[in-house]
Image: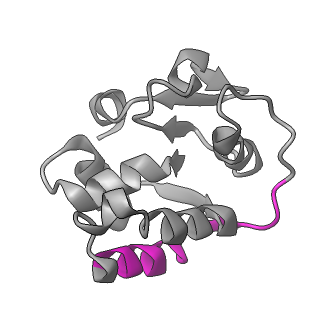
Amino acid sequence: MRVVLDTNILFSALISPHGYPDAIYRAWRSARFEVVTSQMQLDEIRRASRYPKFQSILQPAKVGVMVNNLQRAVMLGRLAIEIETDDPDDAFLLAMALAGDADYLVTGDRRAGLLQRGHIERTRIVTPAVFCAEVL
């Protein structure tokens, strides 16, 4: 099974070691499923982790370990992003789901329209709680 994890899920896993995002991240690290990522997402993680709102809650060393771990995931090459979304910053997540033939895209971002979309082709778009209930 292949899964795209929204960057907000990855950050949440670093921030709170007791929530659904952390359980999902640990399950991937235990080889329960494959994570699909891209250089674009790794760049976003590096960039966003330096935002002032995250500097006091994300430890740079833990972000670095996560980026290193993600480099061992299913790494996609250059993405053709021609997908319309309510939030253009999320288009690459949908492109990763399509290019990586993902079964799930897990996001916690309720305002961006990804969850309302429900799916893109065969990829289901779900919350961390739904993913944990159905998969873990």
Tell me if residue 69 is in the magenta stretch: yes
Most extreme residue toward the front, as rendered? 52
Where the C terminus falls, by quadrant?
Answer: top left
Q: Is residue 54 left or right of residue 95?
A: left
Q: Is residue 21 above or below residue 38?
A: above
Question: Residue visible at 28% across and 56% down?
Answer: 13
Between residues 63 and 25, which one lies in front from this camera angle?
63
Query: Where on the picture, by quarter, is residue 33?
Result: bottom left
Question: Residue visible at 58% across and 38% down?
Answer: 103
Image spot of residue 51 (x, y percent): 43, 63
Magenta extent: 62-79
Residue 82 in view, yes or no? yes
Question: Residue visible at 51% across and 23% down?
Answer: 115
Q: How is the image coloured?
A: one colour
Query: Where on the picture, by quarter, is residue 20?
Result: top left
Image spot of residue 133 (x, y percent): 28, 29
Question: Residue visible at 39% across and 73% down?
Answer: 66
Q: Is residue 39 left or right of residue 51?
A: right
Label tally: 0
Q: Is residue 87 above or below residue 9?
A: above
Tell me if residue 14 is in the magenta stretch: no
Q: Is residue 50 above or below residue 94?
A: below
Residue 1 in view, yes or no? no
Image spot of residue 37 (x, y percent): 60, 60
Q: Is residue 72 left or right of residue 74?
A: left
Image spot of residue 113 (x, y percent): 57, 22
Q: Is residue 26 above or below residue 67?
A: above
Between residues 80 and 87, which one lies in front from this camera angle?
87
Between residues 48 and 110, which one lies in front from this camera angle?
48
